[in-house]
Amino acid sequence: MPFINIRITKEGATAEQKQKLIEGATQLLVDVLGKNPASTFVIIDEVETDNWGVGGQSVTKLRADAKK
Amino acid sequence: MPFINIRITKEGATAEQKQKLIEGATQLLVDVLGKNPASTFVIIDEVETDNWGVGGQSVTKLRADAKK
Amino acid sequence: MPFINIRITKEGATAEQKQKLIEGATQLLVDVLGKNPASTFVIIDEVETDNWGVGGQSVTKLRADAKK
Amino acid sequence: MPFINIRITKEGATAEQKQKLIEGATQLLVDVLGKNPASTFVIIDEVETDNWGVGGQSVTKLRADAKK
Amino acid sequence: MPFINIRITKEGATAEQKQKLIEGATQLLVDVLGKNPASTFVIIDEVETDNWGVGGQSVTKLRADAKK
Amino acid sequence: MPFINIRITKEGATAEQKQKLIEGATQLLVDVLGKNPASTFVIIDEVETDNWGVGGQSVTKLRADAKK
């Protein structure tokens, strides 16, 4: 009964990619700890880039600076 | 000062239902642990069905399969 | 498939009390949203009073001040 | 490599204010624990007022009552 | 800069297994979304079985019932 | 009523340092968003270095490698 929460910036992950994240994370817990996939939850949170900071900068600013 | 986080799939919970979840969760901590409701936080997160997986499948897919 | 996380200070909640929190939280989601208890997760986190702050004070300090 | 999650009600925090929260939280971990800002994550979650309860009431209701 | 939180019951996961979870989860985000492993955080929380409930029962009770 | 969760590796943060984190985080929300400190929660989670990974490595391993 693992619970896996994946938090990523909201930058266009597709439904297919999110399905792959769900499959991969679930399979990882089967492979490493023999967990039952039927009772494994995966939740993906997509966070606006204004709302995610690294090194004291929002990702919005980091992305903008990277384009300069 | 309990903090209760309720995560559900985003499938149409109404404001009234969410108020009932807030009331019920707060009252539960009063009844079981004698906690002060005035300093009890309840946060409800509603998660898109593409972003929630069980058994390696997104809830979007599970719901679709259930209708077949 | 709700996921409910209850965070409380680590101040002696018994196994019986935690079982009641699990039962009550699960039943709440059945009553309000008709959710399936078999796929409802409840996780209780107990946090040291040094590690929980309200009003800028740790709960350890608040409890000590309350005894003065 | 601290991870700081700030949860606030969704009531109009601007991009500038969120940048200040990111800067301030990152600097706090530098000042108090000497952490490396480059590997400090800050995530801000903005929660609808229907979805946040205090004292058994949603913030939506609390705000409405406060205006009466 | 993904953040992955894996919550499992505290039932003897070894340091090696936790290292595999960290590797696998990090690699998953590289494979699916091309994320930079250097800025990918994985945090594993191990939860006491008294503190984790499914179907309204603590895992402690579920495990005990399974042995009967 | 902000909720701030600070997650750090479990590497000896003192009660005084944690009190400073609580004060600083609370004051930050006062300064930036004018929030009421009396209803501001700060929770600090200290995570074992085996349980925290960056770049696919546990912090335990990263620390050991840094000493070589």
Image: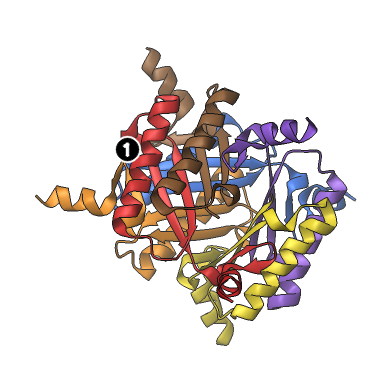
Chain colours: A orange, B yellow, C purple, D red, E blue, F brown
Q: Position of residue A68 (x, y in %)?
A: 9, 50
Q: Is residue E24 above or below residue B9?
A: above
Q: Please name whichever residue, F15 or A58, is drawn nearer the observer in this view of the structure.
A: F15
Can residue F55 be seen from the camera position used here?
no
Residue projecting furthest to the bottom? B68
Q: Residue at x 67, y 31 (%)?
A: C61
Q: Residue at x 36, y 34 (%)?
A: D27
Residue projecting furthest to the front? D68
Q: Position of residue D7 (x, y in %)?
A: 49, 54
Residue projecting furthest to the top? F68
Q: Chain of mark 1?
A: E
Q: Residues within 10 Å of mark 1 (few under 14, many from 20)?
A: some
Q: Position of residue A36 (x, y in %)?
A: 64, 55
Q: Is residue A13 left or right of residue D49?
A: left
Q: Please name whichever residue, F13 or F32, is drawn nearer the observer in this view of the structure.
A: F32
Residue projecting furthest to the right? E68
Q: Please name whichever residue, B58 or A37, is drawn nearer the observer in this view of the structure.
A: B58
Q: Residue at x 56, y 81 (%)?
A: B12
Q: Quadrant of the C terminus of chain F?
A: top left
Q: Quadrant of the N terminus of chain F?
A: bottom right
Secondary structure of residue under mark 1: helix
Q: Is residue C27 above or below residue C41?
A: below
What's the amino acid at mark 1? Ala
Q: Badge 1 is on which residue? A: E38
Q: How many marks?
A: 1
Q: Is residue B10 left or right of residue D38?
A: right
Can residue D17 be seen from the camera position used here?
yes
Q: Position of residue E22 (x, y in %)?
A: 47, 39
Q: Residue at x 56, y 24 (%)?
A: F16
Q: Is residue E40 left or right of residue E7?
A: left
